[in-house]
Amino acid sequence: MPRLTTAEAVIESLLAHGIDTLFALPGVHNDHLFDAAHKASDRIRVIHPRHEQTAAYMALGAALVTGKPQAFAVVPGPGILNASAALLLAYGMGAPVIALAGQIPSFAIDHGHGHLHEIHDQIGLLRHIVKQGERIRSPQEASARVAQAIGVATSGRTGPVALECAIDTWGEAAEVSLTPPIEQTPPCADPTAIAAAADLLAKARRPLIIVGGGALGAGPEVQAVAEMLHAPVSSFRRGRGAIPTSHPLAVSFTEGHALWKTADAVLAIGTRLYWQQSNWGVDDKLPVIRLDIDPDEIARFRRPACGLLGDAAVTLRALAAELATRKAVWQPNPELPAIRAAFVDRLARHEPPMGFVRAIRAALPEDGIYVEDVTQVGFASRLALPVNAPRTYLSPGYQDTLGWGYGTALGAQAAAPGRKVVLATGDGGFMFQATELATAMHHKLPVVAVVFDDGAFGNVRRIQAQQYGNRLIASDLTNPDFVKFAESFGMAAFRATSPDELEDALRRAFALNAPALVHVPVGEMPSPWDMILLPRVRGPEGRPPLP
């Protein structure tokens, strides 16, 4: 067995699991870890941003684009707290992010001595926002801890995990046995449940499929079942791209709401089904089939007519085979053409955001990656940006954390070299991580950031104006000259005042194959919420009954 320090064992174990990038900020608590990474620098790269939040957001972006585990490392206390918002997003979105957190000397943990960066019960705090949090206590257990953590992160409902290690433990050396990756077999739902689901779908004449982030790895299977049933497939944020939005059966969130009213069966795949069950309503005439790998998710809000506990791709293949044995003949939904036409009419009134969305799509290559921050154009893109492949549309999910975008886009770019990455952000959100333009330049990450600048937290300001008698407070912003700001880092920057100018600027920026920024001054944007906060169309008013 090789003699390794704890830090060296961790690096070797990350590499054994295919993790060859560490997004990290150095600090005395993790000096041994960085030294171990330096010794393995021909096999692992370290990308260091300017803030711990960005280290974690970069790991999140890389995980979302690849669907594979990604790691970041920060110092304890303030370092891990700075990174905690990204871990919360990773938990909400099921992203397999591995957090490596330093710790004070092992003899002093939780004794309140006042050590540098000390925080009480750090691992307990982390366990609130990760699937699993553990401490590495010796070099002998380091590799097994990493293998177990990555196994947890990538099994079942994927999600983040955390490992902390004390400053003195990182450098401790011993003979170490490296633990190989844990093999996993995607589980299929129970055959009896699959047969019951097929029976329900065989009776349906207007079935509807709703997909979330849990369907991103099952695109061909979703499409096969949808085509068999002639069932429209509705997605919102996380599920976009599960099947191409250009597919004749792909529908938007808003169109899904219109179809929900008369649907006679719903197949929900890898989604919380929150909006539909909590807002749109459910009644006894609508059997809901929930397919999810998370047992806690299937009966959330209300008990479904049928629950399928298993991997989406494997279970859908079995469901398709079962449906093929039924004698049902499904026909296209006759409502769909009129619903599509009505949605196109609504979008036509949502300018200029839709014009900007079309400009971005026109300039972004087919395999390009689009990251939307919490901004007005981002809201519009959730409804209408064409998305033709999974993991090319990154959205912050139900946490909707303002300012997540730039670091996430940088991580996506690091994990997908050679592909174009564009961020649509607002002036408010962009300034959360604006200094990371330095990181983009230092590590040559050619993300193009499009900053829509209305001089305000625009959504907040509009709500205050419309719902609170125009009593405006804490919503107006003072901004830099964004073009000069970007140029001060040596970055190419452009200004666009219309969709046509934006498309041209993006094409020029992408051609540079270097980091760039496009500043888009805008006025007050129209509200998108009439297409998102949609009324109840089924069942009684109020909260649905608990199961």
Image: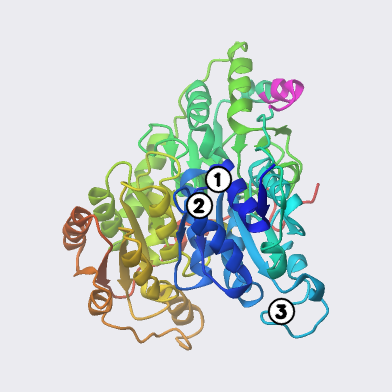
Q: How many other residues sit within 10 Å of disc 2, few (<14), some (14-19) or many (≥20)? A: some
Task: Kindly identify which residue carries mark 1.
Answer: 15
Numbered range of the magenta stretch: 188-197
Q: Which mark is residue 40?
A: 2
Residue tagged 3: 118
Residue located 71% across and 28% down the image: 189
Q: Position of residue 97 (x, y in %)?
A: 59, 53
What residue is drawn where x is 55% and y is 35%? 209
Going from N to C along the chain, the mark reached first, 2 or 3, is 2
Amino acid type at circle 2 is Ala
Position in image of residue 392 (x %, y %): 40, 46
Q: Residues within 10 Å of mark 1 (few under 14, many from 20)?
A: some
* Snapshot colouring: rainbow
SS class, disc 3: loop
Above or below residue 438? Residue 230 is above
Percent coordinates x, y for residue 247 in the rendering: 38, 33
